[in-house]
Image: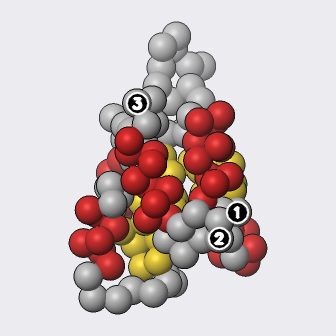
Amino acid sequence: MPVPGDANRRPKKILVVEDVAFNQELLVQLLEEDYEVVTANDGVTGLQMAEHEQPDLILMDLSLPRLDGWEATRRLKAHVVLRTIPVIALSAHAMRGDEAKALQSGCDAYLSKPLDEDLLFATLARFLTP
C-alpha cells in the first residue's frame, strides 16, 4: 500500500516524440509496463504535449517533420516551466559531432538508433530515479 507522498505511487510519465510509427510503437511497447507513455509525431505537437502533459522525461527524435528535434529541444529548454524536464535525444543518423550538437541544443543525454534496451533503461533510471 502506497504511503501518502510516496514518489512511487504513480508511474513516471514519458513523452515519446517520434515520427516513424514503427519506432514509436516499439518504444511504447518497451516502456508501457513501467511508465505512463504519451506520444507525439512531430516537433510542434511534441512541444504542445510537453506543455499539456508535463512529462517527467522526453525521448526526442532529432529528425522530425514540422519542427526538428534540435529546435524543439531548444524551445523546451527556453520555456520557464518545461526547461527542467530531461530530454534524451534519439538519432538514427549517428554522425560524428551529433551527440555534442544534441547536448548543445539542450538535450540531457543522447542515444543512437537502433536503441540498446539496456542502455535505454539505464539512461531512464539515471534521470527518473530520485
Q: CA distance from mark 3 to mark 1?
A: 24 Å
- The disc placed on residue 80 is 3
Q: Quadrant of residue 16?
A: bottom right
Q: Quadrant of residue 89?
A: bottom left
Disc 3 crowd rating (10 Å Cα; few below 14, some 14-19, many 20+) is: few
- Secondary structure of the residue carrying tag 1 is loop
Q: Quadrant of residue 130?
A: top left
Residue 94 or 104: which is nearer the viewer?
104
Q: Is residue 106 left or right of residue 79?
A: left
Q: Mark 2 or mark 3, which has the lower sequence index?
A: 2
Q: Mark 3 or mark 1, which has the lower sequence index?
A: 1
The residue drawn where x is 46% and y is 60% is 71
Image x and y of residue 83, in percent: 39, 39
Relative to 30, residue 124 above or below: above
- The disc placed on residue 65 is 2
Q: Mark 1 or mark 2, which has the lower sequence index?
A: 1
Q: Is residue 49 left or right of residue 61?
A: right
The residue drawn where x is 63% and y is 54% is 44
* Marks 1 and 2 close (CB-CB < 8 Å): yes
Relative to 87, residue 18 above or below: below
> What's under tag 1, amino acid-wise?
Asn
Image x and y of residue 25, in percent: 72, 68
Disc 1 crowd rating (10 Å Cα; few below 14, some 14-19, many 20+) is: some
